[in-house]
Image (cartoon, coloured by chain):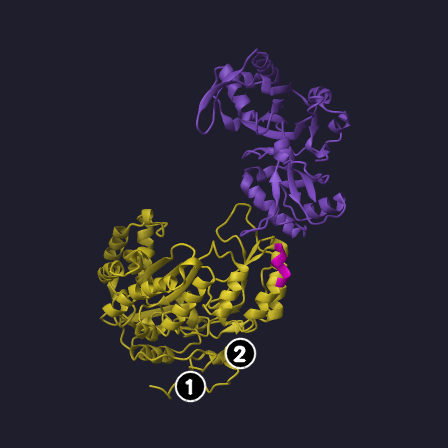
Chain colours: A purple, B yellow
Amino acid sequence: MKVRIKFQKYGAMKFIGHLDVVRYFQKAFRRAGFDSVYTNGFSPHQIMSFAAPLGLGLTSDGEYLDAELVSSEEPKVMIDKLNAVLTEGFHVTGFHILKDREEHQKAVTAMALVSSADYRVSLKDGYDHVEILKSKEAFQKAFADFISQEKIVIDKKTKTSEKAVDIKPMITLTAFDEKEYRDKLSAKIQNNSQQVFDLPESTAEVYQNGIMVYLQLDTGSTVNLKPELVMEAFYQFQNLPYNKFSWQVHRLEIYTRDSDTGKLISLDHLER
Amino acid sequence: MPAFYDVSYHADGTVAGMVSNNPNAPDKVKRQVEMNLSETYYPTTPLVPYIKATQDRVVLEIQRGCIRGCRFCQAGMIYRPNRERSLEYLKKCAYEMLASTGHEEISLSSLSSSDYSQLQELVCFLINEFGSKKVNISFPSLRIDAFSLDVMSKVQDIRKSSLTFAPEAGSQRLRNVINKGLTEEDILNGSGKAFQSGWNRVKLYFMMGLPTEKEDDIEGIAILSDQIARKYYEIPKEQRSGKVSIVTSTSFFVPKPFTPFQWARMNTSEEYLTKQHYLRDKIREQLNRKSIKYNWHEADLSELEGAFARGDRRISKVIYDAYKAGCLYDSWSEYFHFDKWQKAFRDNGIDYRFYTCRERDEEEVFPWDFIDTGITKKFLLREYRNAKAEKVTLNCRQSCAGCGAKSFGGGICYRSGANPEEVTNESTN
């Protein structure tokens, strides 16, 4: 059976890279006594896939991994079993048994479903070297100026090429505080906007300066925009040198987009 | 501790004597030994690194000490007597460690794992218990026989792993000198069986500069490597999987304290380089030269190692001076500055070849003689003479060689089925 596990990554664990997180969960599954399905072949390994790899240094409240198990107990029991063997910095908040794939139906990976993600980008304390970062008001005004441009064209670098891309259409929500974020989010979410309000306690780090911005960005294998790139564009717009270490990026949730309604559904509210 | 002992020297620089200057410091410090390894603490909840580590596995020490008695091996001498952990204890530890860490590999560690008397039972237990969880079992030191190959092909991915033999010396004569009880037949049969089971990579470890070594012995390394390659091509073509790959590595022999070779002369780095070049040329003459890759160790580093291995307290200043001059991370070749080490030796008026390439007199007092490992110097000397006479000494399970470890009152000395008679110190040589 296929299961989808939702977890948080925070604290010092933000420095553990994606591939090490994969290995970490493989070991954790064995410690928890999960009955994993292994691949056949010369070097068998657990069948496990991650929705959208989180960059190094980022924290998250909404990470997803899909795994295949031979058997499972009640989700609550499985969550407790896994949390009992996890270290601080990893915490499981959800366990969903996915519907079996019907015959002739194509297998869907979590990664293929991803189309959008929410981030909270906060200024770390001690990095307010420039005028626009001296106060909340100054930052919000500066960022509002930046985001209200008709087009935001940046040079997007890939491994092989560099091309000018308009990232404006990939930014689907911006907000400066939690209330504004939740209000805007409920309009974008499919059916039960209730899920916006039963979020687990966030593990995001809180900074005294209070300067932050919520961003909803296109994410996934077809279109993908990293929050760091938005911030870099913001600095460019302000003619300021970009310091990537001054911002802490925290992922809040990962969504898929309903093809009929165009609304977002978080990955743990899906049956596939 | 050194402050509690006064050392006097002969005019030639050798140690004259070492006496305690503190009533609480005994003349001889006896090694402490845990005899019952099945009732000791074992760390069953080791730390698991978040980041992939080189040793990404559970390590279970199945026994301590070795029955083999290779004459160059310090661990094989100072960890005597061989003490096995009980099967029940190991099963319990293995279970707890795999459960607590979630590792997917367990290494059954010891100086010679095939000599563990219940290895078959232990491996069967691990396969039954953890096979479904795809846990790999690895053996860092396995003799190649039918059972080992059978087990290894069951528990390890043949495609990924290569087999490692350590013949240590290229000729049977020299293997007798070092008491490495591995015959050419063992090696060739073992590799033949391994090739039939699907392996096509073999690593071979040899030492150069062993006592009594001659050119023939070095050439033997090239010949043996070639013979192993030939063994591979004896298999019918349709059953072979590609080319064979033989990796032959030589390190330079460094005589160690508390071994029968503690009296032996070590080669100079010039001698080592000559031998290395000689072997390289000999390998190039072989039929299967293209299948043989030759790796060697740095000679300078081995010479330093030789000085530290059998040096005395006078060397401490050299080490400190070299450290102050910037010698750190010497194992990384880009940070190894042999000239700085040489200068440190010169500045302290010490010729390191006094420690390395000097055959010791049988009566010489060694700087480490105040440590009593339980293995008598008489036994070590007897073994040194046996080495020069090319005489093999039987392993502890076959017969007691009278090394002195029996005084600890346990282990293999009291377990061997044949209940062999102890050879007294006087009865041979």
**Would you call the spot at circle 2 few (<14 residues within 10 Å), some (14-19), or many (20 or more)?**
some
- Residue at (57, 54) in percent of width and height: B104
Mark with earlier residue (2, 1): 2
- Residue at (75, 28) in percent of width and height: A197
Residue A248 in the image: x percent, y percent? 57, 29
Please name the amino acid that badge 1 sits on.
Val
**Residue at mark 2 to residue at mark 1: CA–CA distance:** 17 Å
* Res B215 → quadrant: bottom left
Residue B298 in the image: x percent, y percent? 30, 55
Residue at the spot of label 1: B423
Residue reaching furthest to the bottom: B427
Residue A1 in the image: x percent, y percent? 70, 45
B366 left or right, relative to B39: left
Residue at the spot of label 2: B410
- Residue at (55, 33) in percent of width and height: A55
Instruction: Indicate whether B303 appears above or below A201.
Output: below
Quadrant in the picture for the N terminus of chain B = bottom left
**Would you call the spot at circle 1 few (<14 residues within 10 Å), some (14-19), or many (20 or more)?**
few
Please report, as a chain letter, where disc 1 is located: B
Q: Is residue B130 magenta?
A: yes
Please report, as a chain letter, where disc 2 is located: B
- Foreground residue, A240 or A166? A166
Quadrant in the picture for the C terminus of chain B = bottom left
Q: Magenta stretch?
A: B128-133
Which secondary structure is most common in the magenta stretch? helix
